[in-house]
Image (tube, coloured by chain):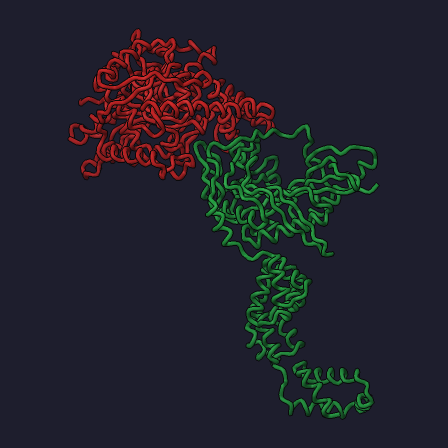
Amino acid sequence: MPNFHSLSSISAALKSGATSSKELTQYFLGRISRLNAKLNAYITVCEEAALAQAEQADAQYRQNQAGILTGIPMAHKDIFCTQDVLTTCGSKMLENFVAPYSATVVQKLNSAGMVMLGKTNMDEFAMGSSNESSYFGPVHNPWQLDKVPGGSSGGSAAAVAARLCPAATGTDTGGSIRQPAAFCGITGLKPTYGRVSRYGMVAFASSLDQGGAMTTTAEDAALLLSAMAGFDPLDSTSADPSRKDVQQSDAWLAQVAAEGYRGENRTFSIGLPRQYYTDTIGQAALADMQAVLEKAGHRFVDVDLPHTDAAVSTYYVIAGAEASTNLSRYDGIRFGHRCENPLDLEDLYNRSRSEGFGAEVKRRILTGTYALSVGYYDAYYVKAQKIRRLIADDFSRVFEEVDVLLTPITPGPAFGLEELTADPVAMYNQDKFTVPVSLAGLPAISIPCGQTNGLPLGAQIIGPAFAEQDIVDLAHQFQQLTDWHQQTCQWVED
Amino acid sequence: MQWEPVIGLELHVQLATSSKIFSGASTAFGAAPNEQACAVDLGLPGVLPVLNENAVKMAVKFGLAIGAQINLHSIFDRKNYFYPDLPKGYQISQFETPIVGAGSITLEQEDGNNLRIGITRAHLEEDAGKSIHDLFPNQTGIDLNRTGTPLLEIVSEPDLRSAKQAADYFRQMHNLVRYLKICDGNLAQGSMRCDANVSVRPSGSTTLGERTEIKNINSFRFVERAIRFEIDRHIDILEGGGTVERETRQYDPDRDETRVMRGKEMSEDYRYFPDPDLLPLQISQTFVDAVAAELPELPEARRHRYEEALGLTAYDARWLSNDPDVAEFFEAVLNICNNAKQSANWIMGALSGYLNKADLGIDQSPVSPEQVGTLIARLDDGTLSSKTAKTLFDHLCSQGGEVDEAIEVLGLKQLNDTGELSGIIDQILADNPDQVAQLKAGKEKVLGFFVGQVMKQTQGKANPKQVNELIREKI
């Protein structure tokens, strides 16, 4: 078998005829059937459909109609609607939900010729930082099975880390791509808000949700993003293609899609926001990373993001508020879970929602409803929006000085299963380095930069809006100089 | 004590776009239940709204027609409440920043004392579906075809002072939106619905009394009756020493009364906030100017034109210009016969009488403007007499057909041949010597008798003018 660890190497092997899509698909399906029981990374596996797609892809190779990603297997986070395949969003509420349409992202990767192996586990409605809120049970971290994989895209992260697929989609509302990527030692790219269509992606917090790529390398993240991103007339918040920065980004993505990713060895001025360098366990690894990059010619500057401390509370007010109304449609009337023998309408609502939603989702609906209520709206929602503006302004100011920012992703490595479930606020604080970026709608990439006690540690590179190319280029350079991204847990080689 | 009613109306106008405000589904009325509800209308997971530009255009058109401020920046909000026919659990509406700001209309009063009625605002929103309570035993049916139909909610100032004024305002707005072609105006299908806010206060007082809101009234008559009932109810309560409770009420036309739907304590907190799925709506002055350039001639301007350029009376001009369908019919008739007075007479007289009797709108008229116009032209050129014209009109109403052909077939052509007429008149004069003597003695009234006799003899085909002349010659 060739080296299956990266999309670019698989693409080369398919092109040369060293392997076929069918062979690859069978290989990954085989790994899933052997290893998924340990990890619980997949909720749904689409064996038959995947093999059919693979055969189609092989035909495209024979007819010389294959693109870079044609025939490469992948997995979708179970938040993306897939026509004819279950979309559960990790919830009992949608345990039996089959959408009559596919998300724009799903359609795009489908037309790029990728093979969907299945749908990955996640925190219920993407609410969680540990994947423990999934109705389908927690995902286990491949590096140490008693640790969490992070969340909410924990299934995707674990699946890529354990090579149950070479790449997967994820979504990031407050860190849901970046944090599990860090916990599982893979690369996770959260694009600029509006870069990837949200159509068909089950909504958690509409002004923050953004689909992205979970891969083994920065190069792969660029490849996958190039097939996912772009203007979508079905999403009114899709990035306006007449904007200059969007056009530049579009041009870069078009080039990657057509010719593959070619990293540029540019040197960057890199900001180190003081507020992010406090007491994290990953300090030493980040220091090593800085040394590597400094040696390669990059320049470091200390910068200030003064409103960082307010980000977690701000985020939980806004995300909760939006979630509380986004989840109103799950009322037991038209689709989703409905309670048995409702006495009347009120009872139907109460029991369907009480039974269909888990504790974390209920907590957020309640806090979000509170934040929007008469008498509290100004004190919570309006104030949070103001702070959100201040946080975004912090970043804008800093990006006048530096090209990108380098920060830790998490306060430490993956924590233990059930370690934080009793303390929601401690759980929320896991997001303190990821939510400011989300509030500002900026792109960020999470890459492995070290290990501690056998668990991976991640670094976050943040760029200005639509500067995905810059953060990918810098991450790629680091990955050319180090091999943290190639390390896997022992049993993955089984 | 003298009481003064204070009334404000909220009108919900379904905009005549072909697709919905946030989805591509059709808005046509009458499809089988849930046939016209797409994934977006159903609020399925992951779907997103995309604003229909035509709805925006229509809202701007309305704003311009009432001289309102057009807000180039407006915001869509979510109004949150649970109801089975509201699929998302929220309605997308505009709360603090509507697209149309303050404007006004002049309410035409029959006594000529026109009133200025302020329009507070008008905003875009999506309609909900329908709950059908009487089709399935012990169950409620949900039809989501109406879900997402664009609505323009027009909120008036509390400037109306009687039930009659409120109904007149409703009627005038009904005419205006049809003039603008932004609504089909079909009240029976719910294209325009009205909520009325009613309070009363002692005459001369400047503070407002406690108000009640009557929801969802869909006819001019019911608006008037519901408000009248509500005013009387308030006055009865106040005169009995009680206080009016702030509440939402429903009008029952069968019993001609309003009933409480929900009280103040049940008023909901809608948790309005800007919809994060839709960016703030930004329109340009160029867009507004382009809409302004498309504005049709409005009722007031048309009425003035009818009076000044066509020489119609104020009464006729108003009668013909109020309703856009009537005005269009009139202009089409006029276009053919070029006789404004006769066009007005025939439409307001014979046609209106026929339509009233048959309970038809002018858009359902069995005779076309072409037929009426040609009929008037034949009257003007002497082919028809007023009597035969009426016979022809009745024939066209019941049988249809082409005007000139019908004149031939029915033999309605006026007798303009003096020879034939002369013979008939001679005979009649000979048969009625007493009357001839009276006429000779100067009793002019007898002339009418002779004309009548001639018309009878000729089955109305004689030209009365000619008959007059011939009789005078002969006597």
Residue at 32%, 26% in the rendered image: A213
Quadrant of res B475 = bottom right
| Residue A232 in sight from this viewpoint | yes
Left-right relation of B279 to A155: right
Residue at 24%, 14% in the rendered image: A292
Left-right relation of A222 to B386: left
Q: Horizontal and vertical percent for residue B472?
A: 73, 89
Q: Horizontal and vertical percent for residue B48?
A: 44, 35
| Up/down of B151 relative to A336, above or below | below
| Residue A139 in sight from this viewpoint | no
Left-right relation of A265 to B377: left
| Up/down of B431 relative to B71, above or below | below
Letter of the green chain: B
Letter of the red chain: A
Left-right relation of B316 to A211: right
Q: Quadrant of the N terminus of chain B?
A: top right
Quadrant of res B360 = bottom right
